[in-house]
Amino acid sequence: MYEVRYLLLAWGLPSLIVMAFGVQHACGFVLVGFGGLPWCWIRSWSRGQWSADGFILQMVFFYTPLACAALFNLTMFVFLASKLGSASAVMSTTMEDKVRRRMMAYIGVFLLTSVWGALGRTFQVGADLIVG
């Protein structure tokens, strides 16, 4: 039963996104490929080149899934850290230390890899606001 739900979600959601782009392309609103529009998934355009439609699509199809994935990862790290804090009665001291150090390393790597992307987007948006 879970496999059917997984397959519907894993294949259905991307199929819906592709179909939405296909319908928009058929209607003359070309967003993917060489449609003459100055649009990219991860670039914010300035100097009047950006449209509200492109902004909304960028938010819906790029930043919303990205934010959901980051929130899920953060939630899992917090959940695991809290479980590790309460698991001391079950694990031995040496095993607990190893697991705790490894978990802290995972959290550190997550934060290290997340911070650079967030800083890059912040500086890019800030530069566009200053220039524009």
Image: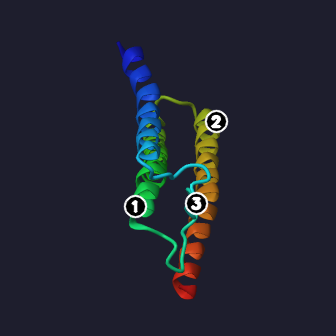
The reply to whether callout 3 and callout 1 are in contact (CB within 8 Å) is no
The residue to which callout 3 is attached is 36
Instruction: Using a 10 Å C-alpha cutoff, classify the residue at mark 1 as few (fewer than 14 neighbours), some (14 to 19) or many (20 or more).
Output: few
> Which residue is painted at 59% across and 75% down in the image?
123
| Image depth: mark 3 or mark 2 in front | 3
Of callouts 3 and 1, the N-terminal one: 3
Of callouts 3 and 2, the N-terminal one: 3
| Real-space CA distance between mark 1 and mark 2, rounded to the nearest whole angstrom | 56 Å
15 shown above or below 70:
above
Q: Secondary structure at mark 3?
A: loop
The reply to whether callout 1 and callout 2 are in contact (CB within 8 Å) is no
Picture coordinates of residue 125 (x, y %)?
54, 74
Q: Secondary structure at mark 2?
A: helix
Identify the amino acid type marked 3. Answer: Gly
The residue to which callout 1 is attached is 53
The residue to which callout 2 is attached is 94
Q: Nearer the viewer, residue 132 or 70?
A: 132
**Which label number is shown at residue 125?**
none
Q: Please, which residue is most extreme toward the top here? A: 1
Picture coordinates of residue 22 (x, y %)?
46, 39
Colour scheme employed for the rendering of this structure: rainbow
Picture coordinates of residue 32 (x, y %)?
55, 49
Left/right of residue 3 with respect to residue 117 in the rendered view:
left
129 shown above or below 44:
below
Instruction: Using a 10 Å C-alpha cutoff, classify the residue at mark 2 as few (fewer than 14 neighbours), some (14 to 19) or many (20 or more).
Output: few
> Which residue is painted at 54% across and 76% down in the image?
46
| Real-space CA distance between mark 3 and mark 2, rounded to the nearest whole angstrom | 61 Å
